[in-house]
Image: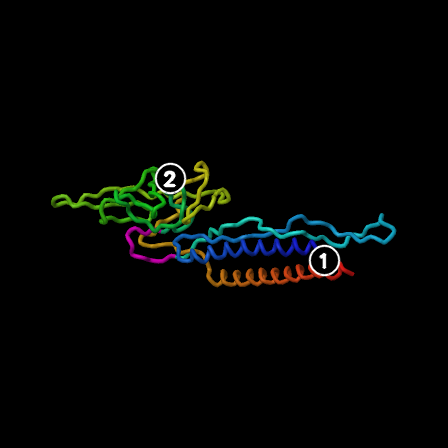
């Protein structure tokens, strides 16, 4: 009886955490470059059940294994690439292939697939309020006017009219890095990832930069809705059975106790 309380209560907690993960994925459906999370659960404190006789206890026969509770094991990040969406925005970029943009944040360099950039009051390329975008040289990229182009390697070239000639200026190349082991990445807020900078490597030749394009979130709304309904039903079922357990325990304490 008491083991049922453990099983049901832990199941409710696990499903509640899973619903939090699913709802966060659904909220970020329209967030550029967002990578969906998936919670994995596991059993805890597995035990072996034995059957013995009423008198002879020396020849116990194993029956099956059981577990006390179910708990959230960990949350995995799905790094699968999302689809591309042309935007015609001059500050929008997408990575074709593996790799991450480098952002200079107050907490150090962090990484993202979100290329929905803008420029701050000083003309530096930024990712919202998170920080400035870094070039291949490790310096923030400054764009002083909107008359520029970007090639498939991420090189930003500006043109400035001086007298009768157009002067070409190299504003820098977007720094794209990748990691041999994505397990070292830690997911932060706003689609950013933190990691040991020593593990970052310059992305290979197969990586391309798509200008005036954004990578969409890799969240599948149908999958998330299905997972949400399944988790909600499991949570409701556990709550109903737990209520029945509580009523039975109340009966045993009040009615059976008087007998």
Position of 91 with respect to 234 (left or right) is left
Position of 218 with respect to 86 (left or right) is right
Please say whether residue 92 is one of the residues in the magenta stretch.
yes
Distance from Cα at disc 2 to Cα at disc 1: 59 Å
Name the chief secondary structure element in magenta.
loop
Residue 239 versus residue 60 in the image, above or below = below
Residue 222 in the image, given as x and y percentages of width and height: 48, 63
Q: Work out whether residue 24 or residue 140 is closer to the camera in this orientation and state it.
A: 24
Display coloring: rainbow
**Which residue of the protein is positioned furthest toward the right in this rendering?**
55
Residue 44 in the image, given as x and y percentages of width and height: 64, 49
Residue 117 in the image, given as x and y percentages of width and height: 32, 49
Residue at disc 2, secondary structure: loop
Magenta residues? 84-93
Q: Work out whether residue 193 or residue 230 is closer to the camera in this orientation and state it.
A: 230
Residue at disc 1, secondary structure: helix
Instruction: Name the image quarter holding the C terminus.
Output: bottom right
Position of 60 with respect to 195 (left or right) is right
Picture residue at 74% right of the left edge, 54% below the top: 64
Picture residue at 45% right of the left edge, 52% below the top: 35
What label does residue 253 carry, if any? 1
Which circle, 2 or 1, is nearer the viewer? 1
Q: Work out whether residue 60 or residue 195 is closer to the camera in this orientation and state it.
A: 60
Local crowd size for mark 1, using a 10 Å CA cut-off: few (<14), some (14–19), many (≥20)? few
What label does residue 106 carry, if any? 2
Q: How many marks?
A: 2
Q: Earlier in the sequence, mark 2 or mark 1?
A: 2
Q: Work out whether residue 130 or residue 237 is closer to the camera in this orientation and state it.
A: 237
Picture residue at 38% right of the left edge, 39% below the top: 106
Picture residue at 42% right of the left edge, 46% below the top: 192
**Which residue of the protein is positioned furthest toward the front in this rendering?**
258
């Amino acid at each position: 009886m008491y083991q049922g309380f453990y099983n049901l209560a832990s199941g409710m907690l696990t499903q509640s955490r899973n619903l939090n993960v699913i709802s966060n994925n659904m909220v970020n459906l329209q967030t550029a470059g967002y990578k969906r999370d998936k919670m994995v659960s596991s059993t805890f404190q597995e035990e072996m059940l034995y059957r013995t006789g009423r008198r002879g206890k020396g020849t116990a026969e194993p029956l099956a294994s059981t577990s006390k509770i179910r708990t959230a094991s960990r949350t995995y990040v799905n790094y699968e690439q999302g689809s591309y969406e042309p935007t015609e925005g001059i500050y929008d970029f997408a990575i074709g292939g593996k790799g991450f943009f480098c952002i200079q944040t107050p907490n150090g360099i962090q990484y993202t697939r979100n290329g929905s950039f803008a420029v701050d009051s000083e003309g530096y390329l930024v990712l919202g309020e998170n920080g400035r975008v870094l070039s291949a040289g490790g310096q923030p990229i400054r764009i002083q006017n909107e008359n520029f182009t970007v090639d498939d390697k991420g090189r930003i070239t500006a043109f400035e009219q001086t007298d009768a000639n157009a002067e070409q200026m190299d504003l820098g190349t977007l720094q794209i890095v990748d990691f041999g082991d994505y397990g070292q990445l830690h997911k932060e807020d706003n689609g950013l990832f933190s990691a040991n900078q020593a593990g970052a490597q310059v992305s290979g030749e197969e990586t391309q930069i798509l200008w005036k394009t954004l990578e969409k979130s890799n969240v599948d709304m149908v999958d998330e809705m299905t997972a949400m309904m399944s988790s909600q039903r499991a949570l409701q079922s556990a709550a109903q059975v737990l209520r029945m357990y509580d009523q039975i325990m109340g009966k045993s304490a009040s009615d059976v106790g008087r007998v």
